[in-house]
Image: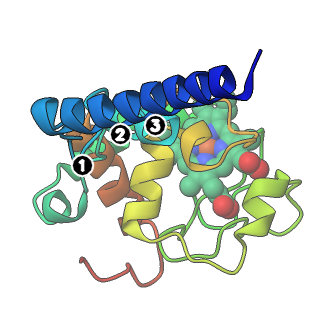
């Protein structure tokens, strides 16, 4: 090829490049793509999912408001469910469970000489306040996972209030009502 012919080839290539650039520029002006500020397809983040899916924790009803008017005699009758394992009289022996005289406001794992579970022993610097007894009697294993108290629990808040109100009377000086 002569140099004149090479020049034609170069000119052709240059021209083609120019056309390509120009059409790209014009196309950009015509279409003017806009990019949305937010991603159109939202991906659920895994750490946000469990909080939304978890069922609401059932709230335990407090016994506090019921204690003053609780039925102590009904509570004594209800305590038959406990008597298989517990004595309630002053100086009474430990059985399957510890003696429970003056249990309100006594420390957890209060009875000397009783082999408590580790979970109750770990709470021995905390008193059995009314709402602790309420939670324990509603569901012993939920309140103290690993407890030795093999008892399903008392479902009714009124019955728990009755039993606790009765236990409160079993003390030299009954604890004040809340
Ligand atoms: C099947 C036997 C059994 C029955 C029934 C039972 N308990 Fe217990 N209870 C135990 C045992 C065993 C423990 C010791 C738990 C531990 O160490 O984890 C205990 C512990 C307790 C404690 C804690 C005492 C402390 O010193 O910290 C309370 C309060 C209590 N029981 C109340 C009751 C009441 C009230 C009832 C009846 C509504 C009842 N229990 C029914 C076996 C029983």
Q: Position of residue 137 (x, y in %)?
A: 46, 44
Taking the spot 54% from the left edge, 67% from the top edge, the residue there is 103
Dot 2 beta carbon under 8 Å from ligand 1:
no
Query: Which mark is first along the chain, 1 or 3?
Result: 3
Residue under label 3, please give it: 45
Taking the spot 47% from the left edge, 81% from the top edge, the residue there is 172
Q: Can you say which quadrant of the picture contains the C terminus?
A: bottom left
| Secondary element at image label 2 | loop
Taking the spot 68% from the left edge, 38% from the top edge, the residue there is 149
| Secondary element at image label 3 | loop
* Circle 2 residues within 10 Å: few <14, some 14–19, many ≥20: few
Q: Can you say which quadrant of the picture contains the N terminus?
A: top right
Residue under label 2, please give it: 57
Q: Position of residue 129 (x, y in %)?
A: 44, 71
Task: Determine the image quadrant of residue 116.
Answer: bottom right
- Between 163 and 16, the residue placed more toward the observer is 16
Of circles 3 and 1, the one toward us is 3
Q: Is residue 20 left or right of residue 139?
A: left
Task: Determine the image quadrant of residue 67.
Answer: bottom left
Disc on res. 61? 1
Taking the spot 15% from the left edge, 57% from the top edge, the residue there is 66
Q: Is residue 165 left or right of residue 15?
A: left
Q: Is residue 103 left or right of residue 54?
A: right
């Amino acid at each position: 090829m002569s140099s004149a012919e090479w020049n034609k080839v170069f000119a052709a290539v240059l021209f083609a490049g120019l056309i390509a650039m120009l059409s790209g520029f014009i196309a950009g002006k015509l279409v003017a793509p806009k990019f949305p500020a937010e991603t159109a397809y939202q991906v659920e983040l895994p750490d946000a999912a469990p909080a939304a899916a978890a069922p609401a924790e059932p709230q335990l009803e407090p016994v506090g408001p019921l204690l003053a008017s609780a039925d102590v005699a009904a509570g004594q009758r209800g305590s038959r469910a406990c008597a298989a394992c517990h004595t309630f009289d002053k100086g009474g022996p430990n059985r399957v469970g510890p003696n429970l005289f003056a249990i309100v406001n006594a420390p957890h794992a209060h009875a000397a000489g009783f082999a408590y579970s580790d979970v109750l022993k770990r709470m021995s610097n905390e008193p059995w306040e009314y709402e602790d007894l309420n939670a324990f009697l509603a569901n012993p294993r939920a309140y103290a996972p690993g407890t030795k108290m093999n008892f399903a629990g008392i479902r009714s808040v009124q019955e728990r209030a009755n039993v606790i109100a009765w236990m409160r009377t079993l003390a030299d000086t009954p604890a004040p009502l809340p």
